[in-house]
Image: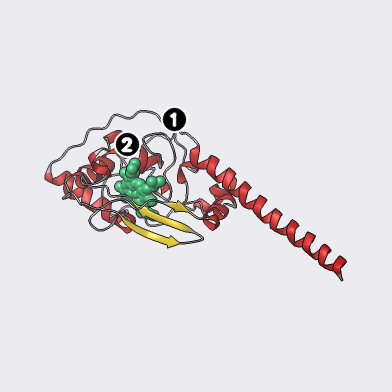
Amino acid sequence: MARTFRVLGIGLGLMVGLVVLWIGVVYLISGRHLQQEYTLHAVNLTVAEDSATLARGRHVATIRGCMDCHGMDFGGQIFIDDPMFGRFAGPNLTRGGRGAVLTVADWERAVRHGVRSDGRPLRFMPAIEYNQLSDEDLTALIAYVRHLPPVDRSDVPIRIGPLGRMLHLTGNLPLLLTARLIDHDAPHRSAPPYGPTAEYGAYLPVHAPDVTDRASAA
Ligand code: HEC
């Protein structure tokens, strides 16, 4: 009897040990991915601020869904909060928050590359969907958000839970770090002429790119 308990105890101990080891490995590897540093080419963009540009920026922000995560007033909001998966919140991008310090280069890095000003990847910022945004649309977007009334709301810290990290490592959460999926050297084209053409339709975010294949290849 005592022997059976001992064997069971050792078996249970081994299992717990393996789970702890596995969680440790998941945190180690995902931690490395989060610390990866990206070096990007410098871009030279000028932001116009006339009313046509601001209207264009508002249109781009709306069809690209920025408010889904950054809030209707761009003042930031939590969009996922789960103990296992994690807590994800878009930061306040108005001049009352991050917008006060973001340079045009910071905006470009974040929106088209999913990379923060210190070169680290942004979490859950779907830059892969915006990587091919034209310079005109990107700068209109920046002008529009900069002209919004400043919102006085603090950012909620992001936390990636064990399930979120595990799904990331198995390639089932490609949107967690889209900087890993982007070809950072790809040239940025101009938007095709506005109109009811297949070419313009292909430029619009009708379908999110199929990132699953590229995630498992990464
Ligand atoms: C699926 C949710 C989501 C959508 C949609 C989204 N964002 Fe984000 N964005 C985030 C999150 C989350 C962060 C913060 C990530 C971090 O701190 O690691 C972020 C960060 C940013 C940053 C960087 C802020 C900084 O501190 O460096 C900018 C700029 C930004 N987003 C702009 C946009 C714009 C413009 C759009 C629309 C074209 C957009 N985002 C759409 C989730 C989203």
Q: Which mark is residue 106?
A: 2
Q: Is residue 129 visible?
A: yes
- Circle 1: residue type: Thr
Return the x and y of residue 7 as percentages of the image width and height: 83, 63
Residue 207 sits in quarter: bottom left
Q: Quadrant of the N terminus?
A: bottom right
Q: Is residue 50 above or below residue 168?
A: above
Judge whether 210 appears above or below 179 on screen.
Answer: below
Using a 10 Å C-alpha cutoff, classify the residue at mark 1 as few (fewer than 14 neighbours), some (14 to 19) or many (20 or more).
Answer: few
Q: Which quadrant holds residue 72?
A: bottom left
The response on whether ligand 1 sits within 8 Å of label 2 is yes
Along the horizontal axis of the image, is 53 left or right of 211?
left
| Kind of residue at badge 2 | Asp
* Residue at the farthest left position: 51
Position of the C terminus, as image quadrant, is top right
Residues under numbered marks 1 and 2 in contact, where contact means CB atoms less than 8 Å apart: no
Q: State whether residue 89 is above or below residue 9.
A: above
Q: Nearer the viewer, residue 108 or 87?
A: 87
Give the CA distance from mark 1 to mark 2. 13 Å
Q: Position of residue 190 (x, y in %)?
A: 31, 39
- Numbered circle sitting on residue 39: 1
